[in-house]
Image (cartoon, coloured by chain):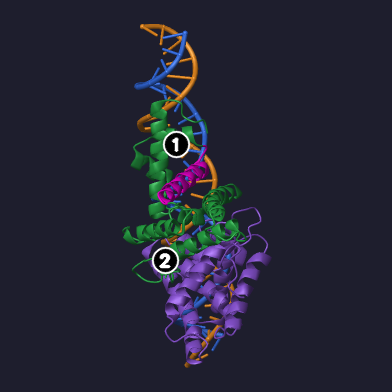
Chain colours: A purple, B green, C blue, D orange
Amino acid sequence: MPEPTTRRGKDTKARIVELAAALMYERGVNATSIDDILAASGTGKSQTYHYSSGKEELVSEVLRHQLGLVLDQQSLFPLDTWQGIAAGFQAMADMQQNQRGYRGCPLGSIAGEVLHQSDFLRGRTADAFSRWESFLADGLRTMQTTGLLRGDADPDALAGATIAVLQGGTCSPPRSATYAPCAMPSPWH
Amino acid sequence: MPEPTTRRGKDTKARIVELAAALMYERGVNATSIDDILAASGTGKSQTYHYSSGKEELVSEVLRHQLGLVLDQQSLFPLDTWQGIAAGFQAMADMQQNQRGYRGCPLGSIAGEVLHQSDFLRGRTADAFSRWESFLADGLRTMQTTGLLRGDADPDALAGATIAVLQGGTCSPPRSATYAPCAMPSPWH
DNA sequence: GGGGTTCTGTACCCATCGGTCCAGTTCCTC
DNA sequence: GAGGAACTGGACCGATGGGTACAGAACCCC
């Protein structure tokens, strides 16, 4: 609960969250025990409970961490041009295909697993997706002011649909042993 | 493992699978213990292990059950006409909105939770989605013979993309407390 | 450098859950 | 209706996992 104040404390907490995120993304949230995280991060049990009230809050930190990953990746592209949008999402698709073994969206796959578990976590997943959606909608709004997007379009609805399609393409179960994300007929040309 | 031969046995197994499916859809797979299922279905532990080798196989039966629900629902509509397709998927969306509390796709929400858990379950989820995909693709192929769909379209790719979009719209985390499925700009103008 | 705060290591607890066992009951078949 | 197979009930077990307690070490500030 209390944020760490010392350098050592900050490092420890960051290491715990980062390793927790990696393990949960790799094997799933429920298949990742606190002990697994401790072993991987080289910390003791008291650290985890010193920095978070329990596993639920730790998952919530992991969601925030994963949202950060997604937004950082998206920020590499100018999402207020059609070319930037195309390139940004193509990069996400490529990332899926290049990683060893199919994992799905770094945020969505974890979110989907904990959606049911509590009102608290459902709220946190909703928050994370809202922030992502706003991020995309902002780019679209800019495009309206620069004339790239029609003025009567609804940026929020478009952003929501975009994320939904992306989630469906990356997080819905693979159809074959190759685990490739669903091939979506491309709208670009 | 052995299929029940008597009437009573069939009833018992069906009851177990049905209740297991309902509970797992309602609260999530990992939040549903064997004991919960037994209590709800009014059976004893030996029945469960008499008809399945363990929880993993039970989940696999649940996946089959949920696929049956989805296909039954879709079968109510003529999926070899544009109107039938529109009506069928509108019905699924309506079902989402009408049920108390947001749950997602009856098949996809469960599949998404167990995808990570084992190669066995990943295979079974892939099978279930393949069968659904084939079901849609068959309708599209019929439409090619009747001239409703262009001959150079790829029914399998279209079916896959359709399911992906549906999953994204119903199973990606809700953005707000209303838990409504994502509003997708309708192609049916 | 001393004292209080922050942080760390580890042993321990207890609830839960998947799974086993076995004795007893019901059901089919001849 | 007798005998064997199919089915059922429930007590029991071991492992796992989340969470607690507490003493000791590192750190920061005066």
Q: Give SS at disc 2.
A: helix
**A20 in the magenta segment:** no
Distance of label 2 from label 1 (alpha carbons): 31 Å
| Marks 2,1: beta carbons within 8 A | no
Image coordinates of residue A147 in percent, x first then y, are 50, 90
Q: Which residues are magenta?
A: B53-77
Q: Mark 1 — residue?
A: B48
Chain for disc number 1: B
- Chief secondary structure of the magenta span? helix
Q: Give SS at disc 1.
A: helix
Q: Which residue lies at the image location 55% right of the left edge and 78% below the top edge?
A: A71
Camera-side residue: A174 or B141?
B141
Instruction: Indicate which disc residue B126 carries.
Output: none
Image coordinates of residue B120 in percent, x first then y, are 59, 47
Q: Which residue lies at the image location 44% right of the left edge and 66% below the top edge?
A: B173
Q: Amino acid at mark 2?
A: Leu
Image coordinates of residue D23 in percent, x first then y, are 50, 65
A75 vs D17: above or below: below
Chain for disc number 2: A
Q: Which residue lies at the image location 38% right of the left edge and 32% below the top edge?
A: B11
Residue A52 is left or right of residue B122, and the answer is left
Residue A32 in view here: no
